[in-house]
Image (cartoon, rainbow, N blue to C red):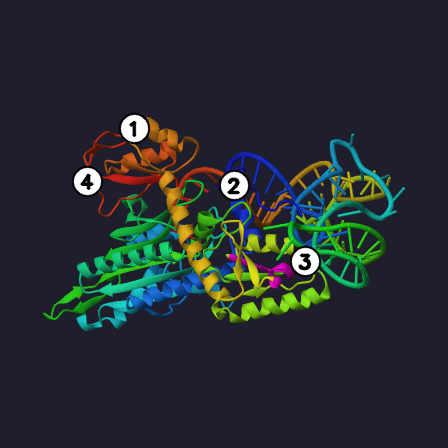
RNA sequence: CGGGGCGUAGCGCAGUUCGGCCAGCGCGCCUGCUUUGGGAGCAGGAUGUCGGAGGUUCAAAUCCUCUCGCCCCGACCA
């Protein structure tokens, strides 16, 4: 079979598409901009869901579900919100064969319908905080789509919380930002920077938008999660008040925060290589695959028995596959499982059997090693943990090597002329300068650090005084 | 919406310039035998509204008109 993956050096965008398709993460759907998430891709999403859901529960949140369809009038209640989202909304105008009295928006996000309900549920300070998350699909009519990174319909979680004070909502927004950071690093092995968005990049209707940003292998930045301090904007738009202990009606303070199936795209672009997908062990739908190797029927029987025996002693959660197909040779099986990103491959052949051992190969590093059959589960467990650590370490060092601190406009332009990287540079905070930098280099302010070191500097473009560096990159 | 590419078997493509027998090739698929520690070999076999509609013609994958869709790049966005 010919080469199926375009090398990254040749065409990064095509490499990404090749990996996603060949790893069977997703396929193009009949509707433009939509994709089918296939079992291998959905399995990763399920792992992400369960990891995140645990972290949400640990921080006191509960899941609920709100409707897909939102009355048009709800969308219009928050001025910035409707302005930001209207252009990318799909709207249902017919139902039951007749025009609807009021068009129904397919949710691009659920703030409005959720706050219409919070109005009913919140009466007293005793009802706060209200900490709800929902796992859902949303639709945004994007001009240009890319598998996982930007699709018309995507899956996500959206947390929506209500608090008595701004201090509380502010703390919640930062807490969930940290949850995302932790998830990205510990589960996805994807190092991220955390910070605050500029006004130009913030969520329509938010007071402040916080984000995590990760560096992809091509030097572009991926916004991997956002957390918004919504202030009282939605409480005022939907008239959500509570009676304080002092007997005063007060507007509620809000947050919302979300991550989406875009994370799967980020995962691909953080770890995968020219041989296909690489999945960190903690997010792998299947941790290990066992490939039996044999010639004669006797060998086949003995090897398969050993393979299944090994698989049986592994924890069920590993979803170990014994690839006992007679229709493919071992070499074929190796490359297929490599394309699909299974973290650990175990080979068992007659030579291994004779020595009471197996051959173990990590997906991220190619050399074959051997391990005794005795205590194999422990060995695999340790191998998986080492791989998880190494992936994070490797991604971190890649990011460090592609992060620059820049003080001259010439150098700034040079970096973004043909490529991209993380660039820490001074910026005056002036929106017009931000726009001009984007115009001239395609690089944007990805985030403003939360507790950046203060230092005297001059804006990279305007030369105006600046107290902190901000993070620039071209963005996905 | 602008630029580029493309629609022919499950996938990848040739054939279209200059119309002409039964529309081809590779991979995959099915059957059999031999194989099996890095994408197996041989033999046999199945598979097509040539994206769609209309037109020109004795004859259209090929020429004309219209149309639908997809991918990539750019402007907008998680």
Q: Report, in whole angstroms, how far the alpha carbon at label 4 lies from the one at label 1.
A: 19 Å
Are the residues under badges 4 and 2 in a single subunit? yes
Magenta stretch in the rendered image: A344-354
Q: What is the CA distance from the residue labelled 2 to the residue labelled 3?
A: 28 Å
The total number of labels drawn is: 4
Judging by the rendered image, the residue that carries numbered circle 2 is A8
Marked residue chain, label 1: A
Asked if the residues shown at circle 3 and circle 1 are in contact, with their CB atoms under 8 angstroms apart, the answer is no
- Mark drawn on residue A454: 4
Residue A23 appears in the rendering: no
Q: Which residue is mark 1?
A: A408
Label at residue A328: 3
Q: Is residue A144 above or below residue A436?
A: below
Q: Is residue A285 left or right of residue A260?
A: right
In front of the other: label 4 or label 3? 3
Looking at the picture, do discs 2 and 3 lie on one chain?
yes
Residue located 68% across and 64% down the image: A299
Residue A158 falls within the magenta-colored stretch: no
Badge 1 crowding class, 10 Å Cα cut-off, few under 14, some 14 to 19, many 20 or more, is some
As measured in the structure, the alpha-carbon distance from the residue carrying label 1 to the one carrying label 2 is 30 Å
Sooner in the amino-acid sequence: mark 4 or mark 2: 2
């Amino acid at each position: 079979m010919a080469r199926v993956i375009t090398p990254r050096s040749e065409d990064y965008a095509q490499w990404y598409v090749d990996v996603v398709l060949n790893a069977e993460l997703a396929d193009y759907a009949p509707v433009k901009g939509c994709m089918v998430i296939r079992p291998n891709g959905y399995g990763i999403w399920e792992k992400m869901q369960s990891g995140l859901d645990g972290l949400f529960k640990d921080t006191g949140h509960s899941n609920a579900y709100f409707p897909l369809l939102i009355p048009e009038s709800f969308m219009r209640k928050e001025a910035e919100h409707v302005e930001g989202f209207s252009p990318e909304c799909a709207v249902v105008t017919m139902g039951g064969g007749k025009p609807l009295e009021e068009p129904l928006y397919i949710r691009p996000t659920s703030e409005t319908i959720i706050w219409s309900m919070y109005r009913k549920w919140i009466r007293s300070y005793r009802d706060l905080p209200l900490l709800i998350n929902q796992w859902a699909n949303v639709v945004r009519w994007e001009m240009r789509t890319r598998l996982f990174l930007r699709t018309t319909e995507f899956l996500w979680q959206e947390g929506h919380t209500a608090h008595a004070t701004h201090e509380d909502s502010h703390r919640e927004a930062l807490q969930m930002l940290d949850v995302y950071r932790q998830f990205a690093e510990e589960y996805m092995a994807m190092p991220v920077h955390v910070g605050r968005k500029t006004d130009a990049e913030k969520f329509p209707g938010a007071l402040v938008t916080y984000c995590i940003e990760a560096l992809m292998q091509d030097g572009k930045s991926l916004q991997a999660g956002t957390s918004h301090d919504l202030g009282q904007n939605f409480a005022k738009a939907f008239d959500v008040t509570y009676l304080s202990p002092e007997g005063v009606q007060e507007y509620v303070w809000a947050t919302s925060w979300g991550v989406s199936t875009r994370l799967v795209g980020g995962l691909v672009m953080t770890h995968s290589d020219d041989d296909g997908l690489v999945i960190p062990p903690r997010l792998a739908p299947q941790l290990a695959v066992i490939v039996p190797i044999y010639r004669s029927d006797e060998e086949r029987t003995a090897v398969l028995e050993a393979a299944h025996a090994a698989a049986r002693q592994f924890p069920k959660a590993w979803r170990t596959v014994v690839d006992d197909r007679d229709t493919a040779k071992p070499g074929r099986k190796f490359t297929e499982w490599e394309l699909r990103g299974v973290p650990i491959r175990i080979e068992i052949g007659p030579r291994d059997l004779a020595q009471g051992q197996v051959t173990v190969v990590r997906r991220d590093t190619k050399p074959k090693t051997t391990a005794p059959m005795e205590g194999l589960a422990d060995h695999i467990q340790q191998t998986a943990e080492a791989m998880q650590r190494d992936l994070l370490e490797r991604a971190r060092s890649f990011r460090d090597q592609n992060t620059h601190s820049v003080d001259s406009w010439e150098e700034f332009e040079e970096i973004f002329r043909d490529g991209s990287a993380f660039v820490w540079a001074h910026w005056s905070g002036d929106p017009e300068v931000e726009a001009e930098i984007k115009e001239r280099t395609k690089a944007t302010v990805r985030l403003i650090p939360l507790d950046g070191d203060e230092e005297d500097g001059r804006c990279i473009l305007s030369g105006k005084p600046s107290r902190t560096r901000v993070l620039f990159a071209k963005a996905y």
